[in-house]
Image: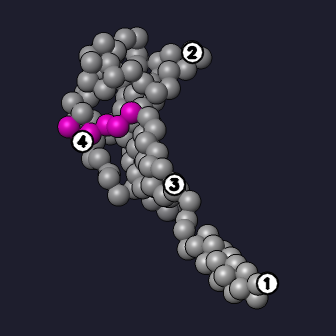
Amino acid sequence: MFKKFILIAFPAILLAFGGCSSFYPYKMEIRQGNYISPEMSKKIKLGMSRQQVTSILGSPLVSDVFHANRWDYIYRFEEKGKLVAQQRLTLFFDGDFVSRIEDRLAGENNVSGNQSSATKPADPAPAK
């Protein structure tokens, strides 16, 4: 009787432990922030009002009280715990109008967008 129990229980326990090691926990797709398509990014131009920007891009993810002249649109996409795409579009306002655009993109789904000359790195000075 005891031998039959061991003959049945031992393989069942081995199968149970083997099954636990072959499965990985589910990791959700995580999309955070404001997705900015290439078309949306290209619509933003210098001199646009805050209202026009909001109608195209929606409200910014980050709107700091201490830096009211800066709006940040940030997007991150993680799949299975790995970063797949990341975007950052920062708009600077002078009064109520866009004065500078910084478009920083990384990941597979890069979006080519506007970038003002103020945000491009300067050429190094020639050596003397």
* Label annotation for residue 128: none
- Residues in magenta, as a range: 34-39
Q: CA distance from mark 1 to mark 4?
A: 70 Å
Q: CA distance from mark 3 to mark 4?
A: 28 Å
Identify the main secondary structure in magenta: loop
Q: Circle 4 sits on which residue? A: 38
Instruction: Kindly indicate whether the residue at mark 4 contacts the one at mark 3 (C-beta within 8 angstroms).
Output: no
Q: CA distance from mark 4 to mark 2?
A: 28 Å
Residue 60 at x, y percent in the picture:
42, 24
In this view of the protein, which residue sits in the foreground, 87 or 78? 78
At label 3, which amino acid type do we have? Lys
In the image, residue 36 sits, relative to residue 55, either above or below, namely below
Of mark 2 and mark 3, the one earlier in the sequence is 3
Residue visible at 35% across and 37% down in the picture: 35
Of mark 4 and mark 2, the one earlier in the sequence is 4
Q: CA distance from mark 1 to mark 3?
A: 43 Å
Residue 86: within the magenta? no
* Label annotation for residue 65: 2
Q: Circle 3 sits on which residue? A: 27
Corner quadrant of residue 58: top left
At label 1, which amino acid type do we have? Phe
In the image, residue 40 sits, relative to residue 13, either above or below, namely above
Is 7 displayed left or right of 30 in the figure?
A: right
10 Å crowding of disc 4: few (<14), some (14-19), many (20+): some
Q: CA distance from mark 2 to mark 3?
A: 35 Å
In this view of the protein, which residue sits in the foreground, 22 or 56? 22
In this view of the protein, which residue sits in the foreground, 33 or 122? 33
Of mark 1 and mark 3, the one earlier in the sequence is 1
10 Å crowding of disc 1: few (<14), some (14-19), many (20+): few
Of mark 2 and mark 1, the one earlier in the sequence is 1
